[in-house]
């Protein structure tokens, strides 16, 4: 059986040029990564949303590099076609460029990712340049960057006023010039996402940013209806929380009532 060629920075660039839309989903473990890969998702993000969508935390801030490395190792083994991106967690890249290179390198060597993602605008440029110089592809992330949720005063749409829209727009140019291969645009008005997407040559991947980005990302447990988290931008493609509860209730009943296990399940 021939294996599909792995998605990479060049094929993503070609997809943008040809107007082919890019799909990205978060993944945190081996078997889910296998399923998402089989289904044809182009990019798997080992996001620091693991802290919320798996760990039950209120924000992504408690997530550490070791957590992302642990999950990235599983995801990379599960994905044969998708490009795997690892999130650099809070304060693992913003303090010194040396730490940024060391931590991004660790994520590649121990988590086996093909690229890393960092949140933030112009201030990230020196970090992006140095990490790239070490041979590590970098994805940017602008708009409602979750690691800054407390600075924003909550989960608020960004880029709504002129000043903040200009900041996002100019930061996208700066990240492109610094060498990012793509940028996630999170929770910004759709018209701003369109302007950014049309003004840069690298792909934009939207989440809560309307229909005009080059691609789309969602948090997988949200889109599969596992977390129960609902927001305007999320389309739920399944209600797995209900499916799982029904299955487990069935199991509990079977065991309590003596219907399972039966002789045929014994050795
Ligand atoms: O951590 C994450 O899952 C993300 C996506 C929401 C883009 O950054």
Image: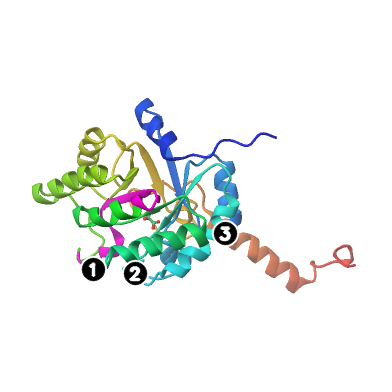
Q: Considering the numbered disc 3 on the image, is that residue within a helix, a strand or a loop? A: helix
Residue behind label 2 places its C-beta within 8 angstroms of ligand 1 = no
For label 1, count other residues whose C-alpha is less than 10 Å away and answer few (under 14), some (14-19) or many (20+).
Answer: few
Could you tell me which residue is drawn at 59 percent across and 42 percent down? 38
Q: Nearer the viewer, residue 95 or 1?
A: 95
Question: CA separation, marks 1 and 2?
Answer: 10 Å
Question: CA separation, marks 3 and 1?
Answer: 31 Å
Residue 238, visible in the rendered structure: yes
> Magenta segment, which residues?
132-151
- Residue ranking furthest to the front: 133
Task: Report the mark closest to the observer, 1 or 2.
Answer: 2
Quadrant of the rendering where the N terminus is positioned? top right
Contact (Cβ within 8 Å) of mark 1 with mark 2 = yes
Question: How far across and how far down the image is residue 207, in percent?
Answer: 34, 47
Q: Nearer the viewer, residue 44 or 12?
A: 12
Contact (Cβ within 8 Å) of mark 3 with mark 2 = no
Q: Considering the numbered disc 2 on the image, is that residue within a helix, a strand or a loop? A: loop
Could you tell me which residue is drawn at 30 percent across and 61 percent down? 146
User: Disc 3 designates what residue?
Assistant: 74
Could you tell me which residue is drawn at 88 percent across and 62 percent down? 264
User: Disc 2 designates what residue?
Assistant: 61
Question: CA separation, marks 3 and 2?
Answer: 22 Å
For label 2, count other residues whose C-alpha is less than 10 Å away and answer few (under 14), some (14-19) or many (20+).
Answer: some
Q: Considering the numbered disc 1 on the image, is that residue within a helix, a strand or a loop? A: loop
User: Disc 1 designates what residue?
Assistant: 150
């Amino acid at each position: 059986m021939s294996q599909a060629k792995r998605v990479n920075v060049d094929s993503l660039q070609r997809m943008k040029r040809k107007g082919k839309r890019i799909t990205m989903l978060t993944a945190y473990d081996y078997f889910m990564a296998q399923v998402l890969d089989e289904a044809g998702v182009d990019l798997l993000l080992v996001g620091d949303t693991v802290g919320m969508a798996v760990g039950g935390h209120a924000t992504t801030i408690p997530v550490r590099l070791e957590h992302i490395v642990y999950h990235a190792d599983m995801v990379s083994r599960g994905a044969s076609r998708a490009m795997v991106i690892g999130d650099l967690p809070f304060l693992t890249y913003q303090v010194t460029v040396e730490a940024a290179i060391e931590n991004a390198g660790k994520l590649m060597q121990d988590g086996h990712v093909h690229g890393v993602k960092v949140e933030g605008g112009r201030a990230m440029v020196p970090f992006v340049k140095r990490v790239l110089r070490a041979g590590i592809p970098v994805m940017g992330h602008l708009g409602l960057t979750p690691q800054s949720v407390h600075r924003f005063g909550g989960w608020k749409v960004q880029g709504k006023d002129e000043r903040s829209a200009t900041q996002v727009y100019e930061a996208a140019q700066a990240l492109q010039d610094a060498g990012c291969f793509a940028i996630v645009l999170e929770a910004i008005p759709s018209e701003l996402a369109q302007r950014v997407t049309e003004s840069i040559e690298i792909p934009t991947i939207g989440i809560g940013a309307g229909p005009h980005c080059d691609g789309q990302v969602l948090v997988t447990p949200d889109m599969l209806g596992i977390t129960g988290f609902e927001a305007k931008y999320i389309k739920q493609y399944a209600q797995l929380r209900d499916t799982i509860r029904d299955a487990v209730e069935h199991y509990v009943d079977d065991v309590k009532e003596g219907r399972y296990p039966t002789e045929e399940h014994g050795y």
